[in-house]
């Protein structure tokens, strides 16, 4: 049996940042990790993936990117190297190859079964990530057996796909990147597009993440957002990180020769049916993008930066082919692969403690788990701010939650 004050489950960037915060406060702890440090970047991300956040924004408590390409986009292997180095520098007490099977509340705190060990702690932090599972819609079960189906968690490179057409379902950050990559391999790609967040890679000479940060949008707090549930379920922005820093929107993909269709709604007798509202969906995404660019322009003016930046401009509306098919026969042989780029979900199924709502989401107030004193969660969308899912969001989030955890321990001692 291992006794410690706090347990952190997961050694991704969030768990490591928390470890550093606990060390700063002299709180004795262990970090339990089922694989190695940065396991999800080693095993669940495709090799060509690059961060869509620029290198200058890659920062953690006690770490700031200092390489020679601040405006570049780090490849997955670079993220592994960065986090491995970070774990070493902050001296995170990580126990690798240690899978947590259950966590339950006991009068003294929490009892955690990890491999064959029992770990007892007064506080616990869940840092197992927001993207542990692929979110696959129920209609996936209606895809004909002859078709290869996969998710971004199992996708590696186009060379491993069968020859023939690929239907990519979902046009957010993952879907647009993989559609472009698969298209380059010579396979015809059809991209099914539902609600999405369109953003240009750069605007008025600055990366879009510079604008998202400068305007204060990323720092918006969870308790100041009108429709928090909606904010927490927004798709990731339609952005990719490429060496050329190009915009990868639907117009770019259409120009490449990718066929854009509406949201995949049903599959009946092997026939995929797409929404006819594609033009409306795209018009709404264009409208919201322009709303943000208006906000950016207003911010630049009030900040007195107009003279330092190129003038405002707007991007071409999304061109929608009025002949986009509404149906595709998946039994015809035209499509050999369906890739579900329909989002990700956390996996807290190992929690043996009633802290989840009927949809399986952990109930929490800015990361402080409801009804379980001493339990915290990290890394979920808009956990404390709109930046919470991003690497740089872990700094402020862990600062706040480590502070709360410290006060909790002090109050217990009194
Ligand atoms: C495709 C993709 C692209 C992304 N791109 C960016 C980007 O450009 N910029 C950005 O800032 N963010 C990006 N993110 C978001 C986010 O930064 C990553 O998802 C990041 O990996 C989340 O970090 P984390 O520490 O919360 O979780 P993870 O990195 O997933 O770490 C969780 C850890 O917990 C471990 N674990 C899970 N269950 C258990 C268990 N039961 N017992 C023990 N250990 C366990 C896992 O092995 C893993 O190591 C991206 C996410 C995805 C999916």
Image (tube, helix red, strand yellow):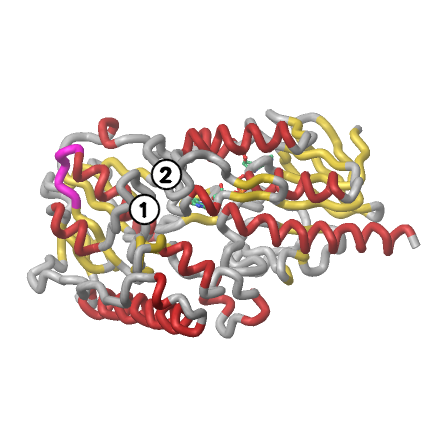
Work out whether residue 105 can be spotted: yes
In x, y percent, where is residue 288?
Answer: 32, 69
Mark 1 in CB contact with mark 2 (< 8 angstroms):
yes
Q: x%, y% of residue 30?
A: 72, 34
- Provide the residue designation for mark 2: 50
Residue 137 part of the magenta segment: no
187 magenta-colored: yes
Quadrant of residue 78 in the image?
top left
Quarter holding the N terminus is top right
Q: Position of residue 41 (x, y in %)?
A: 46, 34
* Magenta part of the chain: 185-189
- Which residue: 36% across, 53% down? 207
Task: Please name whichever residue, 389 or 336, is drawn nearer the observer in this view of the structure.
Answer: 389
Instruction: Name the disc covering residue 240, or none.
Output: 1
User: Is the residue marked 2 within 8 Å of ligand 1, measured from its CB?
Assistant: yes
- Residue drawn where x is 69% and y is 30% of the image: 93
């Amino acid at each position: 049996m291992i006794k410690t004050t706090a347990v952190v489950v997961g050694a991704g960037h969030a768990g490591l940042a928390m470890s550093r915060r606990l060390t700063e406060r002299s709180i004795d702890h262990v970090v339990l990790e089922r694989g190695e440090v940065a396991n999800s970047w080693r095993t669940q991300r495709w090799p060509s993936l690059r961060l869509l956040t620029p290198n200058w924004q890659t920062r953690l408590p006690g770490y700031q990117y200092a390489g020679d390409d601040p405006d570049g986009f780090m490849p997955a292997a670079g993220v592994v190297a960065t986090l491995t180095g970070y774990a070493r520098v902050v001296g995170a007490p990580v126990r690798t190859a240690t899978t947590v099977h259950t966590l339950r509340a006991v009068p003294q705190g929490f009892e955690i079964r990890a491999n064959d060990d029992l770990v007892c702690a007064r506080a616990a932090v869940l840092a197992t990530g927001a993207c542990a599972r692929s979110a696959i819609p129920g209609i996936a079960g209606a895809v004909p057996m002859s078709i290869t189906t996969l998710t971004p968690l199992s996708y590696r490179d186009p060379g491993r796909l069968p020859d023939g057409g690929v239907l990519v379902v979902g046009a957010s950050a993952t879907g647009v990147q993989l559609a472009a990559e698969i298209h380059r391999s010579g396979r015809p790609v059809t991209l099914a597009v539902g609600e999405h967040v369109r953003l240009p890679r750069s605007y008025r000479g600055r990366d879009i993440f510079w604008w998202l940060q400068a305007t204060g949008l990323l720092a918006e707090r969870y308790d100041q957002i009108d429709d928090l549930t909606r904010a927490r379920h927004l798709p990731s922005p339609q952005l990719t990180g490429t060496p050329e820093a190009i915009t990868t929107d639907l117009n770019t993909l259409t120009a490449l020769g990718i066929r854009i269709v509406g949201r995949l709604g049903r599959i009946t007798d092997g026939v995929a049916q797409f929404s006819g509202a594609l033009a409306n969906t795209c018009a709404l995404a264009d409208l919201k993008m322009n709303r943000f660019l208006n906000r950016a322009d207003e911010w630049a003016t009030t900040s007195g930066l107009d003279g330092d930046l190129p003038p405002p401009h707007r991007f071409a509306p999304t061109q929608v082919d009025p002949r986009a098919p509404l149906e595709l026969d998946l039994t015809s042989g035209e499509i050999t692969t369906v890739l579900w780029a329909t989002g990700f979900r956390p996996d807290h199924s190992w929690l043996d403690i009633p802290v989840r709502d009927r949809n399986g989401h952990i109930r929490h107030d800015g990361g402080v788990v409801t009804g379980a004193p001493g339990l915290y969660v990290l890394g979920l969308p808009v956990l404390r701010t709109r930046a919470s899912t991003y690497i740089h969001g872990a700094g402020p989030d862990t600062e706040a939650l480590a502070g709360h955890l410290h006060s909790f321990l002090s109050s217990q001692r009194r």
